[in-house]
Image (spheres, helix red, strand yellow):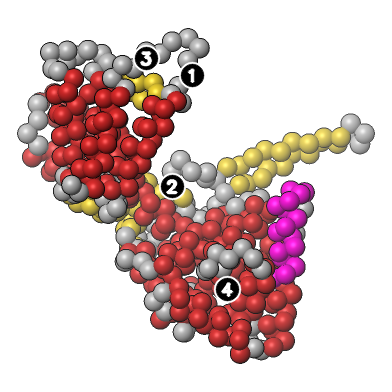
Amino acid sequence: MNKIDKALKNLKEYIRTISDFEPYSKGFTPEIFFSRAEDGVLFLNGEDARNYLRCLKEIVEVATHNEQISQKAVENLVQKAILASLDINERREDVAFNKRIDQAISELRESLRKKPITMQVYFPIAGLAKEGLPFEFGNVVLQEFNKDNIQQFQDILDNQKIPVEEKENIQSIVDDISKKSIGKIFGEVSVKAKDYDAAKILAQRDVRLAIDAINFYSDLIPYSSGYIYLFGDAGRVVIPIPSCSSESLSINFTQKVVGPLTPLSINALIKCNEEKGLGLDKVSELLSGKRSGLGERILSSIQWASRATIETRKEEAFLLYAIALESLILIENDKEELTYHLRTRVAHLLGKDILGKKKIVKQVRDLYIIRSKIVHSGKYQVTDADLNLIRFITKSCILCILTDEPFYSMKNQEQLVKWFDEKILSA
């Protein structure tokens, strides 16, 4: 018996234990509940809830190992199987309980084993200038949505054999998309998935990774004050701030702009990368290929630093830069002597001579005193100088590992740990 069959057998046994479920009643607070319009609502508590989570976890682990179906999609399929088996709304009373379970589990197995297909997913992106598009970065193509994109949808619809009324409804949606989306900027991702929900989740992950990586570079572009984001995320807002004083009989009206001031230019990013060697091609390669542990660590550090770059609160940005630095440098996740390992490794990475390394050791130690004050008291106000210093150190470390040898050619984390150890032992 393979892993998926074993997991489904356990689910089948679990469903039998909840066949005598209690309906919702006043005073009953369920730990878990889920529903489908045609199959009713199921409330779970106590042992039933714990066993549900155990079965779900087992199925998710074996079904999502190749990432072609999302955890949420698996959970939806499991819930559908449970509700179809229980028949809460009594739509299938003529079918025996055991037969309903067998049918539901069989359909679930078929859904989980279904071969993935290639799907194109488009996410609208804000804050990006049109110059330099289309731009392929990692698995994402940043582009202006055009008539060719709409024609792809139209061709598919024209070839679908569906009822006329359904086709007319879909046609109205395609027409609406055409009206609202042509000329707007989208990130297109091609993914292999078993359902559209899974495809959207997988594609959004790639889009967010690409956005984070681009935003990491946003403040390295001369005269740039923009960043990009998905629609629905926080964007540019002008906040009015009125103030007054009865003592001086004075009134003041000011405005504060939160968010990107100007669109980010891909052309400017490419030019900056060509002039300064910022490792943009290396990041794109990491995003699009199968990543090693070191590649995952570099991208994780870039994501944290990216979030710090666009964060408006100084204390929050400071902590995010600290997390980015730790996630890159503290490879072994050793919590003991954290600041010692951090400051010595950063010093060897960035310092050019003994005096330079000593200066960096002191700077990192002082920055981590500030980090401790923010975390433990929450009252420390970070200065621009503090924030600029940790930003400089963090981004310099990331860029060093992205662009300089021997780091550029390293294939795994062990090589980086070995380099650090050799530098410390030879010091």
Q: Amino acid at mark 4?
A: Ser
- Where residue 22 is drawn, which disc sits there? 3
Question: In percent of the image, x 22 and y 12: which residue is there?
Answer: 90
For label 3, the SS is loop
Callout 2–callout 4 Cβ contact below 8 Å: no
Q: Which residue is mark 4?
A: 396
The segment highlighted magenta reads 364-379
Query: How many angstroms separate mark 4 from mark 1 (CA)?
Result: 52 Å
Q: Quadrant of residue 111?
A: top left
Amino acid identity at mark 2: Leu
For disc 2, the marked residue is 230
Q: Earlier along the polypeptide chain: callout 4 or callout 1?
A: 1
Considering only vertical position in the picture, is 39 above or below 400?
above
Where 193 sits versus 93, above or below? below
Our reading of the magenta stretch's main secondary structure is: helix
Three-letter residue code for mark 1 = Thr
| Cα distance between the residues tagged 2 and 1 | 36 Å
Q: Earlier in the sequence, mark 2 or mark 3?
A: 3
Instruction: Look at the numbered disc 4 and give the secondary structure of its residue.
Output: helix
The residue wearing badge 1 is 29
Nearer to us of marks 2 and 1 is 1
Q: Residues within 10 Å of mark 3 (few under 14, many from 20)?
A: few
